[in-house]
Image (spheres, rainbow, N blue to C red):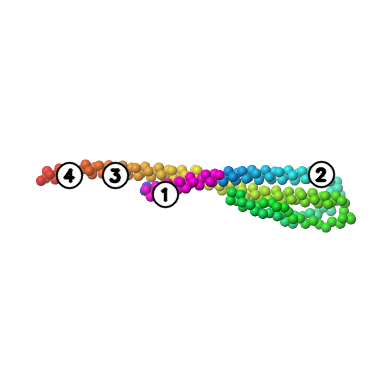
Amino acid sequence: MAKIKLTKTELKAQSDALKRFQRFLPMLQLKKQQLQAEIAEISAKADAVTAREQSARRALESWVGLLATGADMLSGLVKVKSVKTSTANIAGVEIPVFNGIETDVGAVDLWSTPAWVDDAVEAVTSILSLQSERKVLVRQRELVTRELVTTSQRVNLFEKVKIPACREAIRVIKIALGDEQTAAVTRGKIAKSRVPESEAEQEGAA
């Protein structure tokens, strides 16, 4: 513990600091719980998106033979042009929110390509959208987790360092002030007891 002044002014400063830390700690603990809940929810959403993507990929398995013969047609046919996002605030953390994707679809000659190409383009677009959504969710989790680490560190600082330090400082100062008061009272009694002796000495001398 850093050296503290054993004064009433320091006692008040430490008491005020203790009240302040005790007031902020519950808010930090609540924020920590909110962030933990948000991380769990984001993880559940990411898992659900992954499951949907896997389901979409399985749906394409029936087309494997067709895709094998027409792979050159689909190669680079659908590309993600941009990922549309907005922002939201979770417990003081600004996160991206997935709103969809914009794609570039290559020109398709309807006369020379098989009819299933349209369905394939739609399926691939859906998979690309799910992949982009998962990436945004992963980014959300990264940002919220980072804030959780910071908040947890602050909770630990208040619980294990700041509050105990203030309590110990208050204890030490109160003991010192009590000892000082006791010493002052003792000195007063001694001084008072010496007054009659001094008066008696003066009378004897007269």
**Disc 1 designates what residue?**
13
Q: Is residue 57 magenta?
A: no
- CA distance separating discs 4 and 1: 44 Å
Which numbered disc flags the more N-terminal residue, 2 or 3?
2
Disc 4 element: helix
Quick check: can you spot residue 2?
no
**Main secondary structure of the magenta stretch:** helix
Q: Earlier in the sequence, mark 3 or mark 4?
A: 3
Residue 153 horizontal/vertical position (percent) = 54, 46
Name the residue tied to disc 2. 61
Q: From the top left corner, tell me how far across and down residue 183 is, in percent.
A: 30, 43
Whole-angstrom CA distance, mark 2 to mark 4, is 113 Å
Where does the magenta region start and end? 8-30
Which of the pair 72/202 is nearer the observer?
202
How far apart marks 2 and 1 lie (CA) works out to 71 Å
Between the C-alphas of marks 3 and 1, the distance is 24 Å
- Please give the name of the residue rendered at 65% of the width and 52% of the height, measured from the top-left corner: 96
* Image-based side of 103 in relation to 151, left or right: right
User: In terms of sequence position, does the residue under pointer 4 or pointer 1 come before the other?
Assistant: 1
Give the residue drawn at x 72%, y 45%: 49
Q: Position of residue 41 (x, y in %)?
A: 65, 44
Q: At label 1, which amino acid type do we have?
A: Ala
Q: Quick one: label 2 or label 4, which is nearer the N terminus?
A: 2
Tell whether label 1 touches label 4 (CB within 8 Å). no
* Amino acid identity at mark 4: Ser
